[in-house]
Image (cartoon, rainbow, N blue to C red):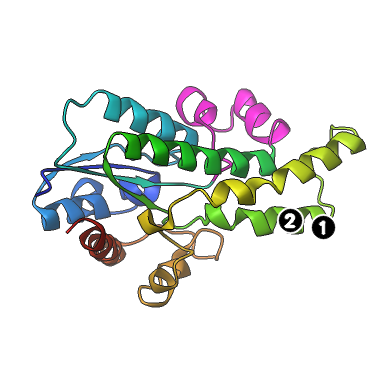
Amino acid sequence: MIKKLYTIGDSWTYGDELKNPKKECWPSVLSRELDCELINQAGPGGPNDWMFRKTIEWVSCQENLDDTILIVAWSEPNRREENYKFMGYESKLWRKVMKDLYNNELSYYKSVCYMVTLQEFLKSRNVKYLFFQPWCDILGSEKRLYETREKKIKYNRWLVEDYQKECYSDSLEIGKIIKNIDGKYLIGPNVPKYIEEYNIRTIMPGDGTGRHPNKKEHKIMSKFIKEKLIELYS
């Protein structure tokens, strides 16, 4: 029997743009379906490095997690905790970190490493968990990074050419790391059923709609996640 549900993520998990995010977000809907206590630490703009740190922190502070399910709803890789927690948007420092120091390959590389490391940490503690990719397919990054190199799109313009080649070569190793992620405990935009049956991907950022999931769509996400949890832990 599950007594506690812990969730962490970005605006999709927080319930941004809902009339009552605290009650209408998918973690809240799911906790009522499971009849359990909810701890939802999601926040709009939440980055993956912050989720990684906060999840380990929370798990480490718990005495017993036998009756707990933990769900990490990963975000887009280029968000960083320095921006999210310590700097104001559009500040000079924000622009320095997010634009001048931006590295697309490295951001995906780090997020994949966060996923693998957190997976092994949770398994070592026998924690019931699920990784959820609501709208950003981090695990599809290997193909994108390869295409980036082939098209010679230079994200690291301040580096000398020889070092650029080395960076691109290293980024292709990301596929070897991705293979360590246990797909059994992962759902999201790379899962056909999630796309075809529930059609959540039609509201992904960048498609022109410029919105977050509505109340009905949060219920759909909750239903999909509940089905997966029953499959894993019933």
* Residue 27 is one of the magenta-drawn residues: no
Q: Quadrant of the C terminus?
A: bottom left
Query: Which dot marks residue 170?
Result: none
How far across and down, in percent of the image, does residue 40 sit? 25, 40
Compared to residue 199, the image places residue 61 above or below, namely: above
Q: Residue lying farthest bottom? A: 196
Q: Nearer the viewer, residue 96 or 33?
A: 33
- Is residue 217 visible in the rendered image? The answer is yes
Amino acid type of the residue that numbered disc 1 sits on in the rendered structure: Glu
CB within 8 Å, label 2 to label 1: yes
Q: What is the spatial separation of the Cα atoms under label 2 and label 1, in whole angstroms?
A: 6 Å
How far across and down, in percent of the image, does residue 6 sit? 24, 41
Query: Which dot marks residue 150?
Result: 1
How many numbered markers are drawn?
A: 2
The residue lying at 62 percent from left, 49 percent from top is: 176
In the displayed structure, does residue 94 sit left or right of residue 229?
right
In the displayed structure, does residue 103 sit left or right of residue 223?
right
How far across and down, in percent of the image, does residue 228 sit? 28, 62
In the displayed structure, does residue 158 sit left or right of residue 208?
right
The residue lying at 78 percent from left, 39 percent from top is: 167
Please provide the residue range marked out in magenta.
77-102
In the displayed structure, does residue 140 sit left or right of residue 105?
left
Tell me the SS state at disc 2: helix
The residue lying at 29 percent from left, 34 percent from top is: 125
Residue occupied by mark 2: 146
Instruction: Check disc 2: other Cα within 10 Å, few if <14, some if 14-19, many if 20+.
Output: some
- Is residue 155 visible in the rendered image? The answer is no
Tell me the SS state at disc 1: helix
The residue lying at 84 percent from left, 32 percent from top is: 158
Compared to residue 54, the image places residue 149 above or below, namely: below
How far across and down, in percent of the image, does residue 226 sit? 23, 61
Amino acid type of the residue that numbered disc 2 sits on in the rendered structure: Tyr
